[in-house]
Amino acid sequence: MRDYLKEKLYKSLYNNAYSRSFYTLLGVVIREMQCSFQQFFTWKYPIRSFLRVFGILCSTIIRLFLGRSLKYSFAFTGEDRIIEGILKPIVNKKGFYVDIGCNHPKFFSNTYGLYKKGWTGICIDGNTELIRKYKLYRPKDIAVNAIVSNNTRETNFYEIENNVLSTIVKSNLDEAVNLGLSYKTINIKTRTLSSILREYKIQNDFDILSIDAEEHDFEILNSLDFRIYSPKLIIVEDETFDFESYSDNNIVNYLTEKGYRMVGYVLKNAYFIKKRS
């Protein structure tokens, strides 16, 4: 019976681009509906989280009526769509991400779209208020208030009014000041990424490492022990990247040495895949 149905459905599913895109969208909608209560409801905020579940269910169902090629993106420049395109996860796959400089749990998030599909992960940011929001928006994630660097030391974290610009790089404050943005200085002790992953017993071969740390990204990469951890896909923000001189890029050279190959650069982000051994 299974083979018979497969034979009958194959042409409808795969031989027509329109029907294929519809069934793919249907699979995504079903998956997100199945995951909605599990991923978003929490007894800590029962009413608010239930209303959030209801809203997500409504928006998910509406997708079926807005076009078979409709694809949501929650990231700043479509990073979540690129990530799914590179990994090509099937609709029932559950994966694990490590999101550093995660900022808001939904707004401009590289990983929120995956969370809606049942993925979970560890999200790290220096902004205490943003990390608290994860308890409501993404209760299944591990949310850590920390600054990640290549060593452990006392440093200043500059929490800027426009929080996506918050940084530990003091020279970055010039732009914020010129824009008339206020900021506050918080003294904090940095941690290495490996120490955080060990503390929470994160699996060695997790799926995604996403880094957006306002010009502190290379130091974060250096804080990961690649002898132990080997994420399948690494996304790093690098506004200095230049295709004409990419062979001189520190991040490209470092990750190449660690067994990764660059598969693309879109706007401000470089994408690296772990080479098969």
Image: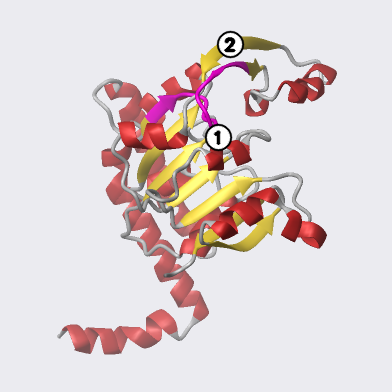
For badge 1, the amino acid type reads Phe
Residue 97 shown left or right of residue 258 in the figure:
left
Quadrant in the picture for the C terminus: bottom left
Q: CA distance from mark 2 to mark 1?
A: 23 Å
Viewer-side residue, 208 vs 64: 208
Residue 169: percent from the left, percent from the top? 69, 25
Task: Give yes or no for residue 81 being in the magenta stretch.
Answer: no
**Circle 2 — which element?**
strand
For badge 2, the amino acid type reads Ile
Viewer-side residue, 220 vs 93: 220
Label annotation for residue 205: none
Residue beneath disc 1: 107
Mark nearer the N terminus (2 vs 1): 1
- Using the image, determine if residue 71 lies above or below residue 171: below
Judged by depth in the image, the label closer to the viewer, 2 or 1, is 2
Instruction: Report if the CB atoms under discs 2 and 1 are less than 8 Å apart.
Output: no
Residue density around tag 1, few if under 14, some if 14–19, many if 20 or more, within 10 Å: few
Viewer-side residue, 206 vs 42: 206
Residue 72 visible (yes or no): no
Q: Residue at x 29, y 88 (%)?
A: 8
Q: Residue at x 61, y 62 (%)?
A: 262
Residue 40: percent from the left, percent from the top? 33, 35
Q: Residue at x 47, y 26 (%)?
A: 191
Residue 218: name its quadrant: top right
Residue density around tag 2, few if under 14, some if 14–19, many if 20 or more, within 10 Å: some
Residue beneath disc 2: 186
Residue 218 shown left or right of residue 97 in the figure:
right
Residue 144: percent from the left, percent from the top? 41, 26
Q: Which residues are magenta?
A: 143-157
Q: Residue at x 80, y 17 (%)?
A: 177
**Circle 1 — which element?**
loop
